[in-house]
Image (cartoon, rainbow, N blue to C red):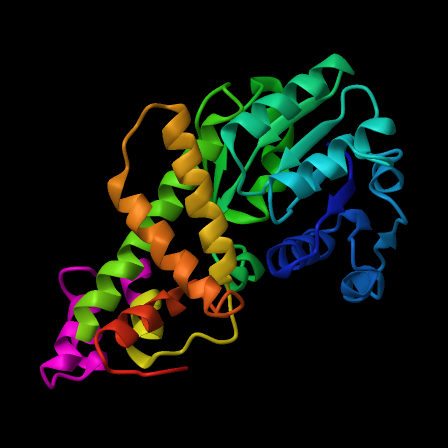
Amino acid sequence: MNKVISFIGLGNMGLAIANNLLESGYSLQIYNRTAEKAQPLVDKGAKLAAHPADAVEGSNLVITMLANDQALEAVVLGENGILEKLSPGAIHLSMSTILPTTSRNLAAHHQRIGTNYLAAPVFGRPDAAAARKLWICLSGNEVAKSEVQSVLNVLGQGVFDFGEDVGAANVVKLTGNFLIISAIEAMAEAFTLAQKNGIERTKIAELFGQTLFACPIYQNYGRMIAHEEYEPAGFKLSLGLKDVTLVLQTASDSYMPMPFASILHERLMASVAQGRGDIDWTGLALEISQQAGIKDNF
C-alpha cells in the first residue's frame, strides 16, 4: 500500500481518522460536501478535491466515512462519483454504518470495473477515533484485506475479521449499535427509577459502573446519563434513529423478529420529533424523565 490515500467524509469521525493518517505520514487527497470542514486538514498538507472522482485520481486506496447509505451510494455511483476515476486494482474501504445489502451491491459494482470494496465499520466515538482506539470490523476479499492491514493498524486498537461476505461486518456493526442503545435505554430507566425514589442518579451509576457492569458502555454512557450531559453530541440522536431503522430493516430481510428494537425505534422517533435530533443519543433518557414526571419540558 502506497502512501497516498483518498479520504471522503469529514464529519466528527472522519476528520479525526483522516488527521491520524496525516500524522502517520500518509498523503491525503480529500473531499467533503462542505468544503470548509476540510480546512484543518488542508492546513496540514492535504489536497482538497472539488468532486469525489477527483479525490481518487492516482490513488489505490479510498476511505469513506459517510452518514448513511444514500450519501455513500451518491459518492460511489453518482455524477462525479469515485467509480469514474478509481484505478484498476484499487481498494475502497467503507467505514460507514450502512445496510449489509448496500455493501454487497456496491461490492458488485466495484468488481465489474476491477476494483475491490471492503466493509470496515468501527466502534468508538470521535474521542476514541482521535486517540486511535477504534475497534474495527472488517469483511470482504482476503487479498484486499491484507493490503489495508497496515493502514487499519494506525487507526484502531484492534481489527476483527468477519470473512469474505462483504456485508458481514455491517451486520456486526448494527448488532453492536443495537446493544449500545439497549444499554442506554436500560440505564435511563434504572437511573430514573432510583431518582423517583430519592436516590441520586450519579450514585447508582457509580455503583454499577464499578461493579456489575464495569465496562466502557456502562461507565462512559452511564456517566453522561447520570449527569444528564447530552451536549455536545458525540453521536447524534438522529443518527441513532437511522441505525435502529437499519437494524429493523436487516431483521426484516432476515425474517428475524426484534420486538425490543421496535420499542427503541419508537422512543428515538419521539425524541427526534420533539426536536432533540442533534443532541447525543444518550439524550434518549430525556424522554424517560419526561414520562416519569421528573421533567416537564426541555
Residue 81 figure quarter:
top right
**Left or right: where 29 falls relative to 205:** right
Residue at image position (50%, 45%) is 122
Q: How many marks?
A: 0
Residue at image position (13%, 60%) is 212
Along the line of sight, the residue nearer the viewer: 187 or 256: 256
**Left or right: where 6 falls relative to 290:** right
| Quarter of the image where the C terminus is located | bottom left
Which residue of the protein is positioned furthest toward the left in this rendering? 197
Stretch of the chain drawn in magenta? 193-219
Residue 79 figure quarter:
top right
Measured as percent of width and height from the top left, residue 291 is found at: 25, 72
Q: Does residue 209 show up magenta in the picture?
A: yes
Measured as percent of width and height from the top left, residue 112 is found at: 74, 13
- Dominant SS in magenta: helix
* Vertical position of residue 238 compared to residue 298: above or below: above
**Left or right: where 11 falls relative to 83:** left
Along the line of sight, the residue nearer the viewer: 285 or 225: 285
Q: Does residue 208 show up magenta in the picture?
A: yes
Residue at image position (60%, 28%) is 118
